[in-house]
Image (cartoon, rainbow, N blue to C red):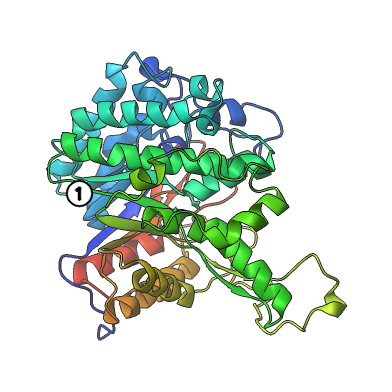
């Protein structure tokens, strides 16, 4: 079949994971407790009552996993470091066994020419820091810089691509306002304060990382889904603008030097998303620190959100004009409420590029949850994931054709894993994992991806 989409030969095809979701080894070799250990051990928090104590047991099976990455031909691998493995109490005493684990991992990746992209914070905060208030406290931003310093001093000679934070808005809102993620708080006015301290810690850490890791490329990974109003009504536009403002612009504006969206502050106080004192947690110099120049922006894209104003009776609103297929359609991911919408990836990339003149992009996550398992012959026919990836790669290629400087693509996820509050009920992997035996099987999507990588396209 002729190739319809080709990618540049130096395009970084990769896959992504996060420490808590795959490692297990939750108490091994001096690791401290994380907020996800605490949260998942609290009855009723995880959909299937599970936890990440063992997960994919990557902590012990990592060399097998690198072999599988090599078999796929991955050129890059996005992983995260567990903060409490390095600093069990969050700051202070360093656990050298934790550093050694990641050091071995990085060496083994480099040996087979897989470029590590390392995320410093993918949500597993040391519980000891949460006990002091976590990211609601400015002191935790200081602790993050200490942690970033320790890690990059040890790995910065070999790791040259660093991601400070993963999805600050999910961490802030889902963990502190909705209570569905660790630390499980439900305090509306906490979200934007936590966000500020995350962004501040990013800004403070970037120069430290650069100093410890000469020549490194540094960025953050943001969750940017595509959203649109459900109808042309004033109500839906307003609701959409606020939601997009809170979830997207509240992160991208300050990172690119525009302060927090001034047009939303009064409304955020009214809704309770900001405390009555507004932005009083912002101190002199913070916004300059946050706007530190970075080398790339990581985009995690999954779906489209269609926003309807829920506060007014349907009869008073205009009829909906933006439609989505019914949710039981096989085109929906099994992840509740996640529509498959490849054009959204094009829209998101072009918007960010045009609005903020982002110098380089990586898709740091994109993928889908379908639970196809092995057939009688031990093959996993996840054709829907193949289709999903094919269409999203094509959308990314279209964005590149209008000038978006996209340099690489990390499929979420390398392997099935512990999907946070959903436990093991959602399988996002290219590789199927048997959570009883920890056996791995390359799904059809993995074999297809291998072909794409080998051919620079499809
Ligand atoms: C993102 C997370 C990632 C994974 C995917 C499905 O929000 O960053 O760890 O859970 O969703």
Q: What is the x, y in percent for residue 207?
A: 24, 39
Q: How many numbered marks, from 0 up?
A: 1
Q: Position of residue 88 (x, y in %)?
A: 41, 18
The one nearer the camera, 121 or 281, is: 281
**Residue at point 35%, 47% (across, down):** 288
Query: Which residue is more in the foreground, 391 or 135?
Result: 135
Q: Residue at x 50, y 55 (%)?
A: 250
The C terminus sits in image quarter: bottom left
Q: Which is more toward the observer, 293 or 283?
A: 283
Q: Residue furthest front?
A: 284
Residue 122 visible in the snapshot: no
Q: Is 269 placed above or below 63 here? A: below
Image quarter where the N terminus lies is bottom left
Q: Is residue 291 left or right of residue 374?
A: left
| Disc 1 secondary structure class | strand
**Residue on which the image places disc 1:** 115
- Residue 238: x percent and y percent? 67, 71
Q: Position of residue 390 (x, y in %)?
A: 39, 73
In the picture, measured across the screen, residue 392 lies left or right of residue 260, that is left
Label 1 Cα crowd, 10 Å radius (few <14 / some 14-19 / many 20+) = many
Residue 54 left/right relative to 152? right
Give the residue drawn at x 32%, y 64%.
Answer: 449
State the residue at coordinates (59%, 33%). 183
Q: Quadrant of residue 439?
A: top left
């Amino acid at each position: 079949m002729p190739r319809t989409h080709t990618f540049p030969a130096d395009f970084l095809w990769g896959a992504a994971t996060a420490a808590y979701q795959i490692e297990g080894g939750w108490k091994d070799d001096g690791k401290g407790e994380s907020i996800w250990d605490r949260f998942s051990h609290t009855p009723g928090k995880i959909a299937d009552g599970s936890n990440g104590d063992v997960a994919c047991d990557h902590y012990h099976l990592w060399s097998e996993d690198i072999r599988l990455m090599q078999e796929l031909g991955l050129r890059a691998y996005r992983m995260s470091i567990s903060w409490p493995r390095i600093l069990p109490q969050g700051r202070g005493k360093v656990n050298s066994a934790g550093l050694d684990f990641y050091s071995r991992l990085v060496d083994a990746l480099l040996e087979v020419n897989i470029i590590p992209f390392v995320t410093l914070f993918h949500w597993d905060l040391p519980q000891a820091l949460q006990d002091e208030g976590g990211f609601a406290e400015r002191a935790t931003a200081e602790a993050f810089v200490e942690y970033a310093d320790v890690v990059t001093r040890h790995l910065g000679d070999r790791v040259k691509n660093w991601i400070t934070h993963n999805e600050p808005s999910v961490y802030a809102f889902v963990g502190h306002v909705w209570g569905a993620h660790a630390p499980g708080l439900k305090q509306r006015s906490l979200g934007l304060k936590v966000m500020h301290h995350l962004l501040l810690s990013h800004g403070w850490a970037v120069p430290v990382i650069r100093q410890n890791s000469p020549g490194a490329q540094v960025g953050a990974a943001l969750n940017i889904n595509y959203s649109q109003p459900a109808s042309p009504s004033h109500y839906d536009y307003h609701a959409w603008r606020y939601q997009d403002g809170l979830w997207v612009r509240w992160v991208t504006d300050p990172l690119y030097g525009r302060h927090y969206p001034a047009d939303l502050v009064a409304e955020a106080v009214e809704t309770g998303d900001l405390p009555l004192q507004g932005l009083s947690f912002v101190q002199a110099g913070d916004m300059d620190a946050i706007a530190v120049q970075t080398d790339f922006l990581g985009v995690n894209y999954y779906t489209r959100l269609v926003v309807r104003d829920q506060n007014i009776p349907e009869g008073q609103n205009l009829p909906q004009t933006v439609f989505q297929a019914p949710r039981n359609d096989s085109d929906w991911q099994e992840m509740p409420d996640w529509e498959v919408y490849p054009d959204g990836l094009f829209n998101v990339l072009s918007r960010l590029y045009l609005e903020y003149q982002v110098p380089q992009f990586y898709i740091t996550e994109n993928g889908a949850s379908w639970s196809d398992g092995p057939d009688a012959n031990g093959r996993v026919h996840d054709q829907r994931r193949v289709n999903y990836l094919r269409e999203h790669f094509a959308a990314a290629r279209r964005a590149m054709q209008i000038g978006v400087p996209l340099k690489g693509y990390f499929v979420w996820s390398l392997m099935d894993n512990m999907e946070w509050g959903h436990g093991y009920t959602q399988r996002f992997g290219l590789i199927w994992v048997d959570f009883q035996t920890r056996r791995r099987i390359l799904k059809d999507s993995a074999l297809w991806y291998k072909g794409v990588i080998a051919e620079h396209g499809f």
